[in-house]
Amino acid sequence: INNLSADTPLRIGLPAFECLQLSLRIYNQTNGAFDITVGSLMDYYSGENKSSKEELNLARRHTGSHLIELNEADYTVKLSTSPVRLDLGGIGKGYAIDQMAGLLSDWSIDTALLHGGFSSVLAIGAKSWPLTLSNPTNHRQILASIFSKGRAFSGSGLQKGPHIIDPHTGRPVENKVAAWACAANAATADALSTAFMVMSPDNIKQYCTNHSDTLAMVLVKQQDAKANESSILRFGCWE
């Protein structure tokens, strides 16, 4: 897809098509906070020429999931401009976990706890699984202790550096340390934890109000506090 010329349809497999469909749905629900087309911006910040405003503006012009057109009749994807660089790093792992859950169901395994490196977790079946969410800057600090049943949790953060891009500004996120999301499936939770790193507290609150099955928790950097201090914002019932 990243090598497609503009207005050239490409037929893709059903799993890839489903993942793109979900990505576009969450893009619209979050007003663009979650955007799989940030690949050009990520390339810009990982390159050596970060001071070029022309290169940055070019990357921003080729960013936005509105540039992707999906045709469900023949499972094709088309780009309205070129190049557009997709990056599924914010949703692909969650989608894969959901597919694993479906496979286990086919095998009549209906109770399991699935995780992808502990940043994405899905509990299936009637059993309640004990989970803890800890502060990434102080692992001794438990932020939430949960008994999860039929729910997914995902976390995103800046432990590996400023690699999460705000599609609205075209700049890396710096005002948050980490964000967690709880949703009905792992792909949605995965995408939302990235979106919550970008969205303002008011917008996160509004999203959770509109989607009552979603929980959010954000670790925000304190502007006028000592270094490494942060505040915890919770949206929904984490008890």
Image: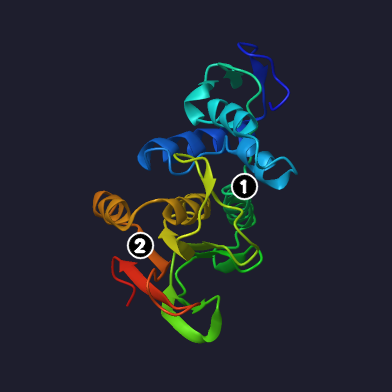
For the C terminus, the quadrant is bottom left
Label 1 vs 2, first from the N-terminus: 1
Please indicate whether residue 110 sits to the left or right of residue 32 in the image. Answer: right
- Label 2: few (<14), some or many (≥20) within 10 Å? many
Please state if 130 lies on the left or on the right of 99 as rendered.
left
State the SS at label 1.
helix
Q: Nearer the viewer, residue 236 or 221?
A: 221
Instruction: Indicate the quadrant where residue 136 lies.
Output: bottom right
Q: Position of residue 40 (x, y in %)?
A: 64, 35
Query: Which three-letter amino acid code belongs to the residue tagged 2?
Result: Leu
Residue 115 screen position, x and y as percent: 61, 65
Is residue 26 depicted above or below 211 in this figure? above
Secondary structure at numbered mark 2: strand
Other-residue count near label 1 (Cα within 10 Å), few / some / many at <14 / 14–19 / ≥20: some
Q: Position of residue 182 (x, y in %)?
A: 42, 62
Evaluate whether residue 152 shows in this view. no
Vertical placement of residue 139 versus 78, above or below: below
**Residue visible at 69% across and 40% down?**
43
Q: Amino acid at mark 1?
A: Gly
Q: CA distance from mark 1 to mark 2?
A: 20 Å
The residue sitting at the bottom extreme is 140
- The residue carrying mark 2 is 215
Task: Give the mark count.
Answer: 2
Return the residue at label 1: 92
Q: Nearer the viewer, residue 5 or 132?
A: 5
Determine which quarter of the picture holds residue 226: bottom left
Q: Position of residue 152 (x, y in %)?
A: 48, 61
Q: Is residue 79 visible?
A: yes
Query: What number is the disc on residue 193?
Result: none
Please identify the quarter of the rendering in which residue 81 is found: top right
